[in-house]
Image (spheres, rainbow, N blue to C red):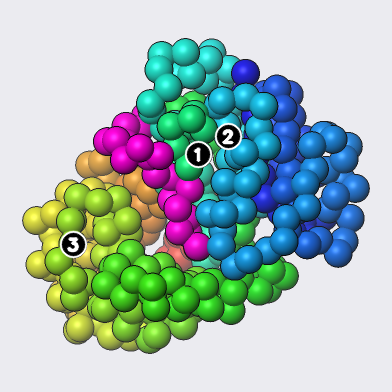
Amino acid sequence: MLTLCMIVKNEENNLKKCLLSIATFVDEIVIVDTGSTDNTKIIASEYTDKIYDYIWCNDFSKARNFSISKASNDWVLILDADEIIELFDRGNILMFTTKGKNKIGRIERLNIMETPNGINKQQERINRLFNKDWYQYEGIIHEQVVSIDNCLIETEDIAIRVEHIGYTISELSRTNKLSRNVSLLNEAILGDPNDPYLYYQLGKSYYVYKEYERASLFFEKALSYKIDYNLEYVGNLIETYGYSMVNNGKYKKALVLEEYEKYYNNADFYFLMGHIYMNNSKFEIAVENFLKCTKFEFSKVQGVNTYLAFYNIGVIYDVLGFMEKAIEYYRMCGKYNPALIRLRQQLN
C-alpha cells in the first residue's frame, strides 16, 4: 500500500497534470495546502478527500513531515506539483517495498532546461520513496530525507521517472522561487554557517536565474570547506561552478577545474572541460575531451555523450578551417538543429 504525499500552494496550472499521471499508481493521496488563493484545493478534491491546510512557517521539512503524518500507509511517495510521471513500474515498486523497510527509493527526475539552442533534459536521481517509520525530512529548504534513529541510510534506484518543469523560465517567473529560496537559505546559514551544502544551494539559486557572478562566489565559498568529492551534490557543485565561470566569460579562471579531473571520470565533466579548453583556444585538448564524452553510455545532460559532443568538435574544425572534418562531425549529430544549419551553410 502506497500513499502519495504532496505540499502545494497556488498550483492550479500544474496540479491536475501531476495527479492525473500518478493517481492510478497509488492507494491514497494526501495534499497539504500552505495557503493557496487559486483553485488548487478544488482540483485536488477531484482526486482525494485528504486535503489539509497548513500554516506556512518557512520550513519545508516541517510541512513535508506534516504531510507524511497524515498518510494511512507506511510507504510514502513524495512528489511536487510541477513533476509529472513518465514511468511507473508497478512490479518494481512492489518488489522494492516488500524487500525491507530500511531502504529509500531513488526516482529518476528529468529536469527540463531551456538553452539558447532549445529545450534540453538533465537527469538526476533523488530520494522520494520510503517508509515513514524509518525516515523523515530535515532542513528548512532543499530538505533531505534522514533516518529517524540515525541509522546508516541505504538507497536503491527504482523504476519511477518524472518530468520536472520547475526550472523553466515561465515557472520560475510565476513562482518567484529565487527570492523565497535565497531568504530561506540565508536563514539556514545563520543557523549553520559552516555547511558547504547550503552555500552550494545558494549558488544554484542564483545560477538558475543566470546571475553567474554571484553564483560563482557561493560555489567558491562551498569549495573552501573540506568536502567529500564522492558526495553526489559535490559533483554537481563542481560542474555548475565551471559553467557559471564559462557563462560569465571567466574562461582562464575556469581552468582551475583541471584539478578535479582525478575525482570525476564521466561524460558531463569531460564535456564541461571541453568547453573550458575550447574557450581558451586549447582546441586539440578540447577535441580530446569531447571525444572522451562519446565513450560513455550515460550522461546526466541529454546529448552530452552523443550529438552535443560531436557538434562542438564540428564547430572547432569549422573555426579552424578543416571543413571536411567539420562536415563529418556535423553529420554525426543527427537531427540536432544547430548542426543541420551549419551543415547547410557548408554544403551550399
Determine which residue is flagged by label 1.
Answer: 128
From the viewer's side, name the closer residue of 190 and 127.
190
Sequence-earlier tag: 1 or 2: 2
Determine which residue is flagged by label 2.
Answer: 77
Residue 104 in the figure: left or right of residue 26: left
Residue drawn at x 33%, y 79% as measured from the top left: 218
The x and y percentages for residue 142 are 47, 59
Residue drawn at x 34%, y 71% as measured from the top left: 192
State the CA–CA distance, disc 1 to disc 3.
Answer: 25 Å
Residue type at mark 1 is Arg
Q: What label sits on residue 227 in the rendered view? A: 3
Residue drawn at x 27%, y 57% as measured from the top left: 235
Residue type at mark 3 is Ile
Examine the image and state in which quarter residue 242 appears. bottom left
Assess whether residue 141 is covered by the magenta stretch. yes
Sequence-earlier tag: 2 or 3: 2
